[in-house]
Image (cartoon, rainbow, N blue to C red):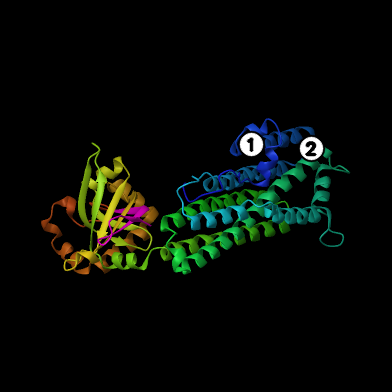
Amino acid sequence: MKIGIMQPHKKYKFLQELVFEGFWPINKLSSQTNTILLLIMYFAWGVLLFLLYDIPVSFITAGTLGALGLYIWTIGIFRYADALRDVEIERINKVNQKFLTEYLEDLFHPSSIIFGVFIYCGVLTYLFTPLFPHSPTFLAQLQSEMNVTSLPPLLMLFIFLLIFDLSYRLGLSLYLIFTQLRRNVRLSRYLKTPMLSSYFSPVDIRNLEGTDRFNFLSISGGFMLIPLGLLDPILLYLLLLYLFLTLFLSSIVLFHLRFLYLRAIPEGILKLLKSAKFAQIGTITTKKRPHLTPTLFIFNGRNFFIATSNKSKKVKNLRSINKISIFIDSQEQKDYTKNVGLLTIGRTRIYGHDIRTGIIYFIVLGFRMIRTYFLFHRKYPHYINEYWRGSRELPRAWRIFPILSRTIIEIIPEQFYLAKASRTNLVML
């Protein structure tokens, strides 16, 4: 995912990755491989403890699921980090370079461990200190169930390491969210400045949103910790509170980026998309030949939508090669120097190419499909009404029968090019 630029010779890494680099042969493996090895180690360790000591099955089961949640969480965070740091270094303007470098410096700062340390200390304090007078601690309850006076050192080490790893992930996700919020505030300030706003493409913001989803999905690994929380009601309440808080804040980050995406589109382009009635759609045939057709379209502030027959050439082409271009211009007839055009290149999502797939898409995305229909009706009321009246005279494949004969194609922009008649070159947004 290409979203910007980093410093050429600096390696941005989390503290855990830097620690792994200090041990052989771990430093020879990728972060994802090290995570798998960590999961295997916890699983093997748990089985060994179960065989050596009379440990309740509920504890081992909860610990195993906790290790699995740790794995999901770590993979999500590393995928998020890789999407940011695996970028090209050249080909970027100075404003974007400064913005993304500041973001990466904040993101991979050593202070990212602070939240995790606080959580770890809080959990250990709770485990060893009674919350109420004469109430047993979590570890005391475990000793009682195992019928021992003290827990084996190997088991204690397992508990400490698992809690530390989980606390580190909990704190890291929280730190990432606050860093994302800070980044969004900085980006919002840039978009308010006319001189700076022209440097930020909506596609760049969409790519940032795509990387942020990895962190959002990684938090879902926290639900695998619920069995651990069931061993203690207070820990369960705190875990659920944390999951609610982080998912809520992460959702705010994603929705704010969607708002910034719309703000990053120049006002002139928004007026063009609102006023223009026709577009030219370009696809590629199975024989690698261009195919161009005129069509009606709508723009919902994020993606383009067109409606067509599910037997159309466009659908056939896109099922083979999922690349599309859409060109929209103002078509000024009196003064060509005022003509403005927008070329968008992207990928598509076809909402069903036959009855079976159409029904599946309607079950999953029915609300979006209905909303798209009403957006078409609002923009082209006369055309839609006349089409309905004369649909019986048309071939069956071209009648307005949603799912049965018609489908929706969603165009997801990946590049924007603005063309003005008074200019000789295209300007990439």
Q: Is residue 411 magenta?
A: yes
Tags 2 and 1 touching, CB below 8 Å: no
Q: Main secondary structure of the magenta part?
A: strand
Q: Residues within 10 Å of mark 1 (few under 14, many from 20)?
A: some
Q: Is residue 135 magenta?
A: no
Q: Which portion, as a residue range, is magenta? A: 408-429
Say which element carries label 1. helix
Give residue 10's quadrant in the image. top right
Judge by depth and name the residue closer to the eye, 411 or 129: 411
- Looking at the picture, does residue 206 appear above or below residue 24? below
| Whole-percent x, y for residue 6 in the image | 54, 48
- Looking at the picture, does residue 340 appear above or below residue 20? below
- Looking at the picture, does residue 16 appear above or below residue 273? above
**Residue identifier under label 1:** 34
**Residue identifier under label 2:** 54
| Whole-percent x, y for residue 125 in the image | 81, 55
The answer, for residue 242, to whether it is visible in the render is: yes
Question: Which residue is at the far left?
Answer: 393
Q: Residues within 10 Å of mark 2 (few under 14, many from 20)?
A: few
Give residue 335's quadrant in the image. bottom left
**Left or right, 115 with reference to 341:** right
The mark nearer the N terminus, 2 or 1, is 1
Residue at point 67%, 30% (across, down): 25
| Whole-percent x, y for residue 57 in the image | 72, 41
| Whole-percent x, y for residue 407 in the image | 27, 53
Q: Amino acid at mark 1?
A: Asn
Q: Amino acid at mark 2?
A: Asp
